[in-house]
Image (spheres, rainbow, N blue to C red):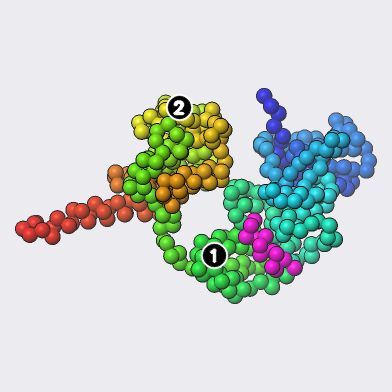
Amino acid sequence: MAHRPPTITQPAIARALREAKKQGAKVVEIKPTGELLIHINKTITPSTTRNNTYSIEDFPPLENERVLIMPKRRPPYLVRERTRHGKIIWYVRIGHGPRVRIEGVYGTQEFVDSYMLALKHAQNGTSKKTKQTRLVEGSFDWLLHQYLQSMQWHNQSESTKKVKYRILNNISKHIGNRAYKSIEKQHILDAVERRRNSPAAARHFLTALNGLFNWAVDNALLNRNPAFNIKPPKSFNAEGFTPWLEEDIDKYYHHWSVGTHERVWIDVLLYTGLRRGDAVRIGWKDVKDNIIHLKTEKSQFKTDVFLPILPELAETLKIGPIGDETFICGKEGKKLTKESFGNLFRKACNASGIKKSAHGLRKLAATRAANAGATVSQMKALFGWTEDNMASLYTKSADRKRLAIESIKKLQKGSG
């Protein structure tokens, strides 16, 4: 079994730092493996350490304390490379853009500061040859820097962090040097007003800011959250993504016959009702007794979903083509990321003359279930929702349709 790098719990770090401080520790360093090293200037116990370097394991956990073992997440766009001389170097690279070298030892404050600056230069498309500037304590840049190192930030899903970081970094480009305590509610209201023609953008903007400022309040860096209770503009389309119609399915099926990748893609989405981030992960490895079992990405892999494989999907999977690991795969049988799959599926839809998204298919699946009489509880179990509101939206719509069909008959002469 491959050895997995340890993740250090917050209590363990605090305990190690306290012990090391008593012994005169000067430098704390986190290695790429996730190991915490504490360097000191004199020889101390325990004797198991060498070269005055102490691992977190040298300070055993307290009674009943559990140390979790799991991979450590790497910050976005951070790339590790070994030179031909065997030296490890780090740099930031966004897409196919230029590489911006990071100075300092991985995990040190110098490294973190260099990473933040490199990231900003990479996103601005500029070279890192400009003189490095230190973060000014009390500035928005400084607050954002602290937030991005917090446990609250790292506990969020990668997709959530990606969206929030893009928004917060864009704000930083405009007001990074400004004192964050000078930001008032009216400033945020004005920013939301500028986004009135894009309600979704305004909503994401407020979500990102509330996360930052709520964290600042919780950590005594702010007395109040200036974004608190600010409402985003009402959406023009309250129903969100445009749902597919049954006619769209017929049109897609006519263009993509059984035995094509594109047919597998749509049937996996339609007959599971999964979001694309979950749909690209499932395969026969997740099936037992003809039931698919997975934990959803949206819930940070905490919510279980159980999905029987319906006969229509079973027939499609039998014919294929499917991948070795996952049902959904590319032309060479390799599994796809949700982003690459989204692009490929959009092209398949366009080729069929359909201008709709994968999420719209999930809406059709939910509509089918509701029209078939599924209850709120059944809808929640099927689609992985934790609240009633989304399931109720579909069941109420289905109920209105049934009531309308029954009521229209009463308009006939002699009825009732």
Position above or below: 180 against 77 = below
For label 2, the residue is 288
Position above or below: 236 against 297 = below
For residue 348, the mark is none
Q: For the residues labelled 1 and 2, say whether their Cβ atoms are less than 8 Å apart.
A: no
Residues 321 and 228: in front is 321
Q: Is residue 73 magenta?
A: no
Q: Residues within 10 Å of mark 1 (few under 14, many from 20)?
A: many
Residue at screen point 85% across, 30% down: 48
Callout 1: helix, strand or loop?
A: helix
Q: Is residue 47 at least partly visible in the picture?
A: yes
Label 1, label 2: how far apart the Cα atoms are: 43 Å
Q: Position of residue 221 (x, y in %)?
A: 70, 64
Residue at screen point 49% across, 46% down: 347
Which of disc 2 and disc 1 is earlier in sequence?
1
Quarter of the image where the N terminus is located:
top right
For residue 202, the mark is 1
Q: Amino acid at mark 2?
A: Lys
Callout 2: helix, strand or loop?
A: strand
Q: Position of residue 249 (x, y in %)?
A: 36, 44
Position above or below: 218 against 357 = below
Q: Position of residue 145 (x, y in %)?
A: 73, 58
Indicate left or right for 24 with 415 as reference.
Answer: right
Residues 53 and 339: in front is 339
